[in-house]
């Protein structure tokens, strides 16, 4: 019950540990998450505390264990599946989009599907095109899922706890570039965060910047740069992509009249388009300029460091996009 | 009583030695006369249900497509027999038989096919997605193979619960070629889960015969790749199915792990309602029609003096009447409300 | 070389036949497409003409044969893969998004990936939630793919021919509700259609309606309804989703000042958002009202006929969306 | 010459009878002295390349992650030996060895790992994605199992071309548990494709030992599920690998279909650069280090009087110097142009 400065990684471990203590029906499955604590150490200590029955090293078989999570959820358990790299969601995509997401609806709401899929993604670490994707765009359109994207230790902790208690399937996109980032978290408490809605991180009156995951610190960096130029940017972490609630973003835009979205995905098919479309709908008369989107380019992420860096949004490129509008 | 025909394959040969009780090869628990009559009635009920689905289809009551299981009733019924109420079952779009064998009400099943509010899934699922979670009917999967990992998960639940439950997964010969099959068998075997993999080998995946898609017709051989206990059985002989499944279920309940059970069978009709099934050699079809599981079992019960022809006819007639009446009631049920709160059906 | 009235299905068959005659390196793979001609008869006659080596019935193994298509493409062939229902793209998603789409880029442009995936999707036929999806939203964000959506026999024919000749991976989303629709097609000719850009189907001055696939005829129906009310709607078939070129749509909106998109997918994550965002960008000062989107609701498609019908956009609902803006 | 150790498993027992020429079990084509020296040199080259990658990594030149193959060189080299220039090879993120064994230039390989414009993939791929289409190196796959269906496709090309080409797919023990593996083996067997499935069983998938993820350690058993010709071999004995692969390749060239070849081996280092590999029992590691394929083959060549210790040392020293020089040149190469036309790299 103490407010502590911990890392995003530690926040994940704390949330998992606390929720697994709280409810014996929870269990976690994934590759190399047992004695070794996970390739990204996001399951550190779980095996020691909860044992092999509830902390399960799986074969390399994402369809198998993600599908098994559905079976567990339908029969009384609350499984958590770890996908080592979000990129691997491709190999179990069917289970997620046709199975997990639709099962309850197709049953006429007989069944509930209380499960969590944690997928660790993101670029900037020179992992190349098959190990650097965040992955949200692939599932953004899938009804029946809840999709959240924690950008800080507090969110990683609070949203993961909520996700585990939620009776619906929740996909959590974690970012490996954030794992060592630090922030204050009140662990051991019932600090649950909602699984919908966005969060204003920095108030401002001149422009609204909406970002997610590792783009959030970069958006905050952009706000600093803009501040120096006398532009007060409001920074919002969209945080939850499905169901998507953009009312607070529209509210902000009614004040700032300028909207810029920042995401670590290609422009076409990203959530930025949805935010732009919804906000244009809700705050049309308030917009001073067409909303802008800062995204990845429309090609796979290159491996070479200077090319990867050039492909990713930066505080500078975000600030430039804002300045072009105000 | 017949015993299950052992698969004459390497996998069976190399299967772990049968345990004293519950191992494959051990005689199944004996069936009483009442059990036997029950098996026949259950098969007749499924047959008449499916025949009624076909008639209702022609009347325009069944929407979209539908996948009937006439000819495969002995599998659903024989395999369901050793199950307890608290066991779990997953199955496919060709799943009416599995649902009925577990006691699903005909009326609610018809109503689902008709898209009515009284359907088991309130009309949100349809023919391919009958579900009845209270009866352990955890899901009917439209994507080939997709139900198998889910059954593995239910098997893990069973193992963790420690109450001797089992999970049974029905799937076709065609499903044995997709990745989900492989991952499921491997995980179940590594974790020694109480899962019964019941393969209904009806020799066809849609319009394509097994020899074009699989290196052999005896799918029980697949189990060798997982060193899994396995057995092949005449899927048109309901008692043979029971005799193969019962010990495997008993073994699973006792912690002996999964079993792969290949049931050799045949579907009388086409793959789905638009398929006249012209791709099948007439002799093959004729041979299998002669081995209709209802005809076979009727003869057997007659031989055992448990059933006269008249009684058998009566059972079928009763089932037909029940199916007709259920379909009629279902057809009279209201459509679901267009203005209902659908989001409450998506999320809890 | 004759202009004929043929069905969308026949157009597909004609394009496949002609291109397979033209180039012996082409071949087609899929489930039940051989002697039986395909569950939707989209491969009728191919087996008889080209034989078992080039018209290949596959096991039910989409990952296997879609991955094999990549291997064929990398080694000198030009494979075409048929996905029986678009919904099944989920089981081979990884091969498409991580393999096929990225292979050339990751190779430093050494390799080319000349392959076509035809996926037959769409609702309205009471196939339930796992057999009624069109599927574009899942792949919309994937760089490296070309994605096209033919809405008429002429497009089915011309775009499929272009796709087969293209040296890049092309995903074609066909719609099973359109298979029996008829239209004029000049077969036997070099009537290739481009794989980018949209097409104006009906000119108008008062509103721009952009639709795809089976929503195109419905949008045209809406234009008829609007006409009766004195509203001249311009109807555009977006036709190509990736790369997306919205310049002609923006051009239209500069004239009409009103934009309505219509798609058979959920709103969140659909292409409509991208069109809205791009057009807002390009024609901001011309917009009289915030663009509207007519889409599927944010739940899986229900099986029951009245519920499925209510979920799908109709000429009436499209016309109403337009009227709300003009 | 050693012959391949036959897998003492059912699958091997039930394998189709070996053909007169080229069948498994038939002696491989004899190796000349020059061949043997070539095998040793090729292994030394890979070893020194990987050791240099490690040093370059410590110097900050290798970005992201990298998966080294020290200890597994005999597989890459022995399996590559019977291949022709026009054959196809697919492999994984642990693929440096396979590329070098097919003749990839060290400098371009280093440059790729260093993200330079002279890299085999111009810096767009990285360590996990070395590719050289001209050498039949059709792809290095980062997703476990994903290269296998691609190899099947290349095998279909080979079959259709009718020029006796083959397709070889390298993958790990862990990959044997994923769906793509299953679909690939089945299709290759049903279509009788000239595909060599070379499983590098190094006992670990990342940090997890095979016994936690697979029902047995002899992965050759998997082949029984496809009735596929199969053989298990000492993957640290380069001639044994060759002797197992050569007849399988010959058989494939002649239309005899695919073979599954399990090579038992071990990686000396951790899974990837951040992994100290503490999860492995010391005795296991020690035993395998003693069976280092370079040590084993050096001893063998000495025994055969083909190589003195001095000559062997010289070969390694030369390879080390070559690797060092190549790395140096690669490190001096320019970064790729940030303003290049990337879209031209995506689409033709
Ligand atoms: C992944 C996937 N691919 C293709 C299909 C289309 N399809 C539906 S049933 C079927 C045949 C299945 O054959 P089998 O497993 O033998 O079952 P049966 O229909 O004979 O009961 C196919 C190809 C599907 N539903 N899912
Ligand atoms: C589908 C998928 N799941 C997980 C991973 C992460 N991963 C990379 S390598 C690896 C272990 C693979 O083991 P094995 O096949 O034995 O090959 P090895 O690394 O031993 O050469 C895992 C789990 C991946 N790349 N792809
Ligand atoms: Mg079948
Ligand atoms: Mg390994």
Image: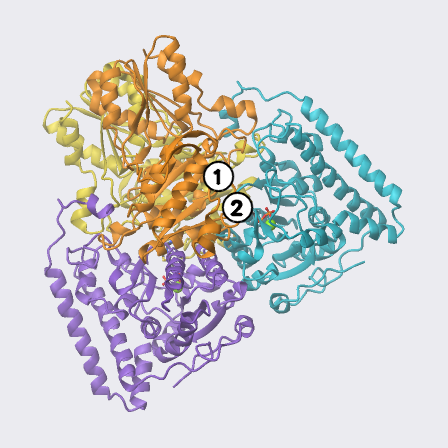
Chain colours: A yellow, B cyan, C orange, D purple
- Secondary element type, mark 2: loop
Relative to B3, is C303 on the left or the right?
A: left
Residue labelled with disc 1: A98
Circle on res. B14:
none
Chain where mark 1 sits = A
Residue labelled with disc 2: B146
Q: Nearer the viewer, residue B189 or D340?
A: D340
**Residue drawn at point x = 42 percent, y = 70 percent:** D252
Relative to B114, is C161 on the left or the right?
A: left
The answer to whether residue A128 shows anywhere in this view is no
Asked if labels 1 and 2 share a chain, the reply is no
Relative to B256, is C108 on the left or the right?
A: left
- Indicate yes or no: mark 2 CB to ligand 1 under 8 Å: yes
Return the x and y of residue D10 as percentages of the image width and height: 56, 72
- Tell me the crowding category of disc 2: few under 14, some 14 to 19, or many 20 or more residues within 10 angstroms, Cα based: many
Q: Quadrant of residue D126?
A: bottom left
The image quadrant where one finds the N terminus of chain C is: top left
Q: Quadrant of residue D107?
A: bottom left
- Work out how far the residue at label 1 is from the one at label 2, CA to CA, in angstroms: 9 Å
The image quadrant where one finds the C terminus of chain C is: top left
Return the x and y of residue C58 as percentages of the image width and height: 48, 53
Picture layout, residue D262 above or below residue B158: below
**Residue drawn at point x = 40 percent, y = 42 percent:** C118
């Amino acid at each position: 019950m103490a407010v502590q400065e911990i890392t995003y990684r530690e926040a994940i471990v704390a949330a998992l540990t606390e929720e697994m203590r709280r409810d014996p029906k929870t269990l976690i499955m994934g590759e190399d998450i047992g004695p070794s604590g996970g390739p990204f150490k996001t399951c550190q200590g779980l095996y020691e505390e909860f044992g092999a029955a509830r902390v399960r090293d799986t074969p390399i078989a994402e369809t198998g264990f993600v599908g098994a999570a559905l079976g567990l959820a339908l029969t009384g358990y609350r499984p958590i599946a770890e996908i080592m790299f979000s990129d691997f969601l491709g190999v179990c995509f069917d289970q997620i989009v046709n199975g997990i997401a639709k099962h309850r609806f197709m049953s006429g709401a007989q069944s509930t599907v209380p499960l969590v899929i944690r997928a660790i993604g993101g670029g900037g670490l020179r992992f190349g095109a098959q190990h650097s994707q965040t992955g949200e765009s692939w599932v953004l359109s899938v009804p029946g899922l809840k999709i959240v994207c924690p950008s800080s230790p507090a969110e990683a902790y609070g949203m993961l706890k909520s996700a585990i208690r939620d009776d619906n399937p929740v996909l959590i996109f974690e970012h490996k570039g954030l794992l060592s980032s630090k922030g204050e978290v009140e662990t051991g408490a019932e600090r649950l965060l909602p699984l919908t809605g966005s969060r204003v991180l920095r108030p401002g009156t001149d422009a609204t910047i909406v970002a997610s995951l590792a783009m959030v610190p970069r958006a905050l960096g952009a706000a600093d740069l803009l501040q120096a130029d006398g532009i007060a940017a409001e920074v919002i972490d969209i945080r939850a992509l499905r169901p998507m609630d953009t009312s607070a973003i529209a509210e902000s835009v009614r004040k700032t009249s300028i909207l810029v979205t920042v995401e670590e995905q290609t422009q076409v098919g990203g959530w930025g388009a949805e935010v732009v479309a919804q906000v244009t709908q809700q705050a049309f008369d308030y917009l001073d300029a067409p909303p802008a989107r800062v995204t990845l380019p429309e090609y796979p992420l290159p491996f070479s460091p200077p090319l990867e860096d050039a492909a990713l949004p930066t505080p500078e490129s975000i600030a430039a996009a804002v300045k072009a509008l105000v | 009583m017949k015993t299950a025909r052992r698969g004459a394959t390497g996998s069976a040969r190399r299967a772990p030695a049968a345990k004293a009780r519950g191992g494959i090869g051990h005689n199944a628990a004996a069936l009483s006369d009442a059990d036997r009559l029950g098996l026949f009635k259950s098969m007749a009920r499924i047959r008449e249900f499916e025949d009624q689905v076909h008639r209702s289809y022609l009347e325009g009551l069944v929407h979209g497509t539908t996948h009937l299981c006439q000819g495969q009733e002995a599998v659903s019924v024989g395999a369901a027999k050793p199950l307890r109420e608290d066991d779990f079952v997953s199955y496919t779009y060709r799943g009416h038989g599995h649902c009925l064998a577990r006691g699903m009400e005909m009326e609610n099943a018809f109503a689902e096919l008709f898209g009515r509010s009284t359907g088991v899934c309130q009309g949100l699922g349809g023919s391919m997605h009958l579900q009845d979670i209270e009866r352990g009917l955890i899901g009917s999967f439209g994507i080939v193979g997709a139900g198998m990992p889910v059954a593995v998960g239910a098997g893990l639940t069973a193992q963790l619960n420690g109450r001797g439950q089992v999970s049974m997964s029905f799937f076709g010969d065609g499903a044995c070629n997709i990745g989900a099959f492989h991952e499921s068998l491997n995980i179940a075997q590594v974790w020694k889960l109480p899962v019964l993999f019941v393969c209904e080998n009806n020799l066809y995946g849609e319009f394509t015969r097994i020899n074009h898609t699989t290196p052999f017709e005896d799918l029980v051989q697949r189990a060798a790749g997982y060193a899994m206990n396995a057995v092949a059985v005449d899927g048109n002989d309901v008692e043979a199915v029971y005799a193969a499944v019962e010990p495997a279920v008993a073994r699973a309940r006792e912690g002996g792990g999964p079993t792969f059970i290949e049931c050799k069978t045949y579907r009388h009709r086409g793959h789905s309602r638009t398929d006249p099934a012209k791709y099948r050699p007439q002799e093959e079809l004729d041979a299998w029609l002669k081995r209709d599981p209802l005809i076979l079992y009727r003869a057997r019960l007659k031989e055992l003096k448990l059933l006269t022809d008249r009684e058998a006819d009566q059972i079928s007639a009763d089932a037909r009447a029940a199916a007709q009446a259920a379909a009629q009631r279902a057809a009279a049920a209201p459509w679901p409300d267009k203005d209902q709160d659908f989001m409450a059906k998506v999320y809890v």
